[in-house]
Amino acid sequence: MAKLDAATEKRILEAVDQGFEEQIGFLQELIRKPSLRGQEQTAQDFLHDAYKARGYALDRWAIELDSIRYHPGFSPVTIDYAGAFNVVATHRPREETGRSLILNGHVDVVPTGPHEMWQNPPFEPKREGDWLYGRGSGDMKAGLSANLYALDALRRLGWQPAGRVHLQSVVEEECTGNGALACLARGYEADAAIIPEPEDDRLVRANVGVLWFKVTVRGVPVHVREAGKGANAIEAAYRLIQALRGLEEEWNARKGAHRHFEALDHPINFNVGKIAGGDWASSVPAWCSFDARIALYPGVRAAEAAAEIEACLRQASRADSFLANNPPEVAWNGFFAEGYVLEEGSEAESTLGRAHLASYASSLESFVTTSYLDARVFVLYGDTPCLVYGPYSDNIHGFDERVSLASLKRVTGTIALFVAEWCGLEAVEAAGA
């Protein structure tokens, strides 16, 4: 499509500015919906109704595991998906003369931790200067608002995309990636995709994969007075954790063989995110389990990395007098996702670069991130350039999460400009909208 002229760019950015207070109010209401895993329905209903009010075609469905279970991008789960709903709103032009686009975002948020450790209640948004606080404010309900209000800005000028646009609100991004995968399996494809994750006004060039797993250790319980006759499952679990720390360092030592990750100090991060064990302070614990996460480089197969983790645990167990005869159990219970690289030189990236320059008056920068992103679904399995690019945020996954409103407005402007050039524009009035 033709590049936008300076006058058109200015009009679109002004339209974003005119609607921004309404966008902030929309985002605040979305933050009030506590869309933790398994509790996303109220937030999805809110988005569904917002899309419906604008006249978009709607598709809302519960993820069916059988539709994705045998896909190479599937992550194993043990929970019921009956309440895990995706929502997709579709704009179809009168005449499809432009390129198609997916604007994707995830509605699920991570747990808050103790509410008393927040300055303000996590699901009561607070606006303070340039910051909007609340769980999900940055990761990534701000991005969902940017997707919707970028299209609203064009409508305010009497325009709509001349290409097909899918607004996707997915679940499961924080734990499996199966929500975005279910959209792909359902047939949603496009010439490009944008995911406005909180990436500090930059474009993600490469991204690690992620594995989640649970290790369970069984001990021998005895009264603490006879502790030497028992086997402490908690202490045995810590010995396995130390072995996995060693594997983490081995993987980090391989960074030189992986493009885009050579300069990072510590690209592979292993984390024990949850641990439980024992039943009584005066009893040697009979059990212990820990849930862990580790990253893997793009190009490394998830199954190969999982096999290496299992081998590490077997080797550590053989060297342990108790674990040698009581090996741990390993279960893969979440992310089983591979990393990706966004190759340079795509027309989509060039279009984003021009849009960013108009919105920010500075050149678009790219960087490498070591967190999971749903973009791997589009890049690895949809053969689609996926641009992960979003607002400046702080404390995501932590206490007092917040998003910069000035950054969010600029990102919304960038997306509006991208849509206008990538999809082209047609008049809303003639469509009878």
Image (cartoon, helix red, strand yellow):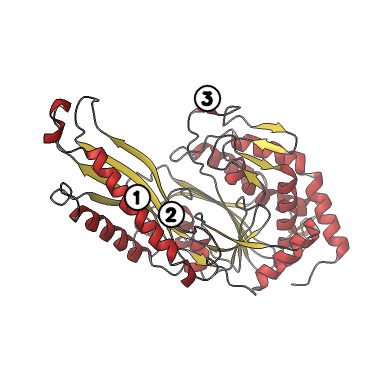
Label annotation for residue 178: 2
**N-terminal label among 2 and 1:** 1
> At numbered mark 2, what does the secondary structure look like: helix, strand or loop?
helix
Identified at 15% across, 25% down, the residue is 225
Select label 1 or label 3 by which is in front. Answer: 3
Write down the residue under mark 1.
77
Residue 183 at x, y percent in the picture: 49, 58
Give how far apart the Cα atoms at labels 1 and 3 are.
Answer: 31 Å
* Number of numbered markers: 3
Q: Is the residue under label 3 in contact with that under label 2 (CB below 8 Å)?
A: no
Instruction: Give the farthest residue toward the bottom.
Output: 345
Q: Amino acid at mark 1?
A: Val
Where's the N terminus, which quadrant? bottom right
Q: Is residue 283 left or right of residue 290?
A: left
Q: Amino acid at mark 2?
A: Asn
Identified at 76% across, 66% down, the residue is 354
Identified at 28% across, 58% down, the residue is 312
